Image (cartoon, rainbow, N blue to C red):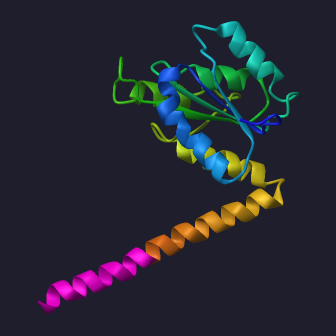
Amino acid sequence: MSTNPLVGIIMGSDSDLAIMQGAADILKEFDIPFELTVVSAHRTPQRMVEYATTAKQRGLKVIIAGAGGAAHLPGMVASLCILPVIGVPVKSSSNSTEGWDSILSILQMPNGIPVATVAVNGAKNAGILAATIIATNDEKTATRLESYKKEMESAVLEKVEKMKGDWKNHFDN
C-alpha cells in the first residue's frame, strides 16, 4: 500500500483476496504504488460510488476490480469514472458456474462503458495490463516492463535448450 497510489485494486469480497493478490504482487514487482480494499457493488453501493467518483482526484490512473458471481463491480465502477477499469472475473467457490457468470458479466458491457477483461482468476495479467497503461507516461515503468518481457523470453529459451538436451539423451539411449 502506498500514500500516493496510482492503481486501485478493489474486490467485491475479502474471499477474493487470494486471487487479487496476484495483481498486488506484480505491481510491487514493478514498483507501482497501489491501494487494495473491498468495495462491494451490492453490499456497499454508497462506498462503491464514493470510491469510483473520487478515484481520479485521489491520483489513481487505473482501477483493477475483481468480482465473482454476478460481477457488477467492474462495470459499475467504469460507469462512474473515466479511468480505465480492468475487470478480473473471480471463480466463486459458493455459487460458481466455472466463472462463466463472472466473465460474461464483465465482458458483455454495453456500448459506452468499456471494461478491459482478463481471464477468470487472471489478476496477475490485470496487474501487468495496469503497468502497461502506467508505462505510457512513465519511462521507469516502461523499462521495467521491457525487462520483464525479456526475462520471460530468456526463461522460455532456456527451457527449449534443456528440452533439446533431454530429448537428444532420450533418443540416444
169 in magenta: yes
| Residue located at (70% from left, 62% from top) | 144
| Residue located at (84% from left, 30% from top) | 56
In the rendered image, the quadrant that contains the N terminus is top right
Total marks placed? 0
* Image spot of residue 72 (x, y percent): 57, 19
Label the magenta part by its dominant secondary structure: helix
| Residue located at (77% from left, 33% from top) | 83
Residue furthest toward the right?
57
* Image spot of residue 77 (x, y percent): 69, 22
In the rendered image, the quadrant that contains the C terminus is bottom left
Q: Quadrant of residue 108?
A: top right
19 above or below 81? below
Nearest the viewer among 87 and 152 is 152
- On the rendered structure, is 142 left or right of 104? right
- On the rendered structure, is 12 left or right of 63? left
* Image spot of residue 107 (x, y percent): 54, 32
- On the rendered structure, is 137 left or right of 114? right
| Chain part drawn in magenta | 158-173
* Image spot of residue 156 (x, y percent): 45, 71
75 in magenta: no
